[in-house]
Amino acid sequence: MSSQTRHWRLDGNSSTLLVIRDHAVPRLFWCGSRLHDDTELAHMLVHDDSALAFGGLDGVTPLSLFPQASTAYTGSPALNGHRNGAAFAHALHTSDIRQDENHLTIMLQDDHVNLSVELHLSLDASSDVARMSTSLTNTGNTPYTVDWLASATLPMPSSYRECLTQHGRWGLESQTHRRTIAPGRIDISNLHGRTSHEHASSLACGTAGFGDNGGDVMFAHLAWSGNFSLRIERLSNGTISLQAGVLYLPGECLLQPGETVTTPPVLFTRGNGMNQCTQRFHQHARSSILPAWTRRPRPIHANSWEALYFNHDQDALFTLIDAAASVGAERFVLDDGWFLHRRSDNAGLGDWYVDTGIYPEGLHPVVERVRQHGMQFGLWFEPEMVNPDSNLFRAHPEWTLQLAHVDTPLARNQLALDIARDEVSDYLFERITSLVHEYAIDYIKWDHNRDLVLPGDGAHARAAAQPAALYRLMARIIDACPDLEIESCAAGGARADFAVLEHTGRVWTSDNIDPIERARIQQGFLRFMPPEIMGAHVGHKTAHLTGRVTSLHTRAIVALQGQFGFELDARRLDPHDVITLQHYTQLYKRHREWLASSRYWHVPTYSKALIACGFVDEAQRQALFSVVAIGNMHPTRPGHLPLAGLVSDRFYQLTLESINLSELAPFNKIIPDWCDHAVTTTGEMLMKFGVPLPVMPPQSALLIGCHRVSDS
């Protein structure tokens, strides 16, 4: 240890970040469980891995917070760039470090290549979630091209051997994949121009076999809604790092003299098992990211899309509104098809004017009908898109993202607007706010139905400008309409990240509302995102995306995992189904306040055919656990489901909250007592022995309730 070694410490409730400076650039020496307050630096540095093997470069320095080749680092550097092909190498060194409570600012500079960097590292003490971002300034007098600038480069323990990443497609988001951290680099690169169905900007890394309740685990998330790269690298010397940042297209990030680029932040935490990390991310989102309106009781949605599609008719819409209200809806959302020439997805996008051919008096009668039932009114928009067959495109073809010499591929018969242009964002702001004010709109479903392929301004790439312009436009609209709520929808869940959620506060998780597929999708989504922002709706008996037939009970139980609502056509429900759906809407209303601040648990099951999760209130007095049978169980005996998050020495009343015992009875010679009547037992028994499950046929579900009955 050098006598010049200095350190800075950031403490949370259960975590410590320790940054030391013993080389040109500081390094994150410890990120993990909280260190004792009296721990001395000298004692920690005894454990520093300072050995150097033969066969490599001399004097290799440890992985810093801003790795660069000038320190003999052969992994992915924090910065790749150049000045017209020159100045590709740099040797940034620390010029100053400032600490303001739990925020650390590290200033680096290289006067030879004329660059300066600020690293921002902070720790939210209440949630134990840290964040890091980077700012790069061109202090020279010629332009500097940035090819890659990492938001963060984080060291990971050498014992880490596996990572979980999330991938998917339209209608099948948030599918989890586990892989080995082998020598070399895992690179999750997204070039879809939005957060994407294909690659989530979140991942987990940990020791071999890490699980829900055990194993050393680190969660990380890049808060960004555009192209990105997540890199996990294991070098031959054993160094393992996690790096994340914006993935720029060629020439996209060009810093003129004096200009600065600031990266989106990486959020990260390290804990014992995935459930602990999940709960920290949920808490951090609630306290530091989500809009204040997400703390209010989340209303039950009724969305018109699967009931009407483009077949808008005012009289039919009135009966749909009436039926939705009768089963408990509190917010009615008029989806795609209300604006000019929108009889299919071939035309109309961009022309945000009510089609008076369908609605002769505008939307006023529709809104009035909604208000008569005491419901809120929501409206669908896709502001960033335009159909070539639209008045807007005919007037302003230059407003689209395009290249002069290449035909831009269509997707859903549409092109993307260049919303970074002031005249485009001004047009969208005027149209949206005018409609919000005219109809007192409570909520916007903000869609984004295509990838950004060849996103250019005619000659130059513009992909990274889109998310930044989106955030500005949303902030501007919310400033003008402070009571407005916005949902992030992108052909389902293709824009779910903690950057857009600063403005939206709700995500349409997937266009697939088949409950069996949704159970898997929601399991992945809830790893990082809190349940109250997860749009989860009851669909039709026959799912429109898969053709699978499921019971109303299963559809409702899965939807209760998030912000509850329905897509089904309530006009077509028989009297028994109306009673059933009313039961689940009332159940949601009784529990939604505590569910919005609950602690989420993914519950391991003995069978891959079962998916289970639970929600426990902050006082550990109430809990709901759902179990979904996505296939046939093996072995034939159902076994027990150990619950989680309860108080061991307190008594709980165990109840079957779903009213589907008649669906389960034919498959059980004997059914557990608690399914037929409430039983009382201790939290310890429920967590250690578990709940004895009935035989569950494929595509069935259970909703288990726990209520603490005694503090003695």
Image (tube, grey):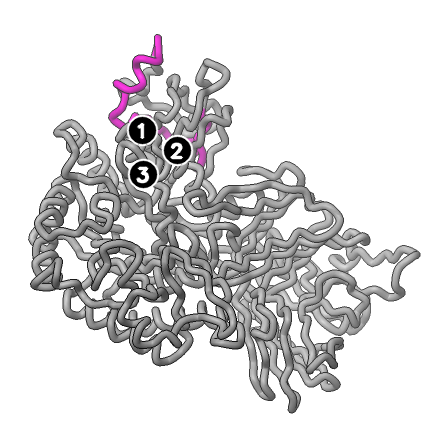
Q: Which residues are magenta?
A: 641-670
Pick whichever of labels 1 and 2 is earlier in the sequence.
2
Q: Residue at x 68, y 71 (%)?
A: 80
Q: Is residue 664 magenta?
A: yes
Pick whichever of labels 2 and 3 is earlier in the sequence.
2
Which of the two discs, 1 and 3, sits closer to the camera?
Answer: 3
Label 1 belongs to which residue? 550
State left or right for residue 264 relative to residue 665: right
On screen, 430 above or below 675? below
State left or right for residue 434 relative to residue 609: left
On screen, 624 above or below 606? below
Residue 28 quadrant:
bottom right
CB atoms at circles 1 and 3 under 8 Å apart?
no
Distance between the alpha carbons at the discs numbered 1 and 2: 9 Å
Q: Residue at x 65, y 59 (%)?
A: 154
Q: Visible in this render: residue 98?
A: no
Label 2 belongs to which residue? 516
SS label for mark 3? loop
Q: Please rate how many residues cluster around mark 3, counting C-alpha atoms within 10 Å: few if below 14, some from 14 to 19, many from 20.
A: some
Give the quadrant of the C terminus.
Answer: top left
CB atoms at circles 1 and 2 under 8 Å apart?
yes
Distance between the alpha carbons at the discs numbered 2 and 3: 13 Å
Give the quadrant of the N terminus.
Answer: bottom right
Pick whichever of labels 1 and 3 is earlier in the sequence.
3
State left or right for residue 299 relative to residue 116: left
Q: Residue at x 17, y 64 (%)?
A: 354
Q: Nearer the viewer, residue 127 or 468?
A: 468
Q: Please rate how many residues cluster around mark 2, counting C-alpha atoms within 10 Å: few if below 14, some from 14 to 19, many from 20.
A: many
Distance between the alpha carbons at the discs numbered 1 and 3: 12 Å
Q: Which mark is residue 544?
A: 3
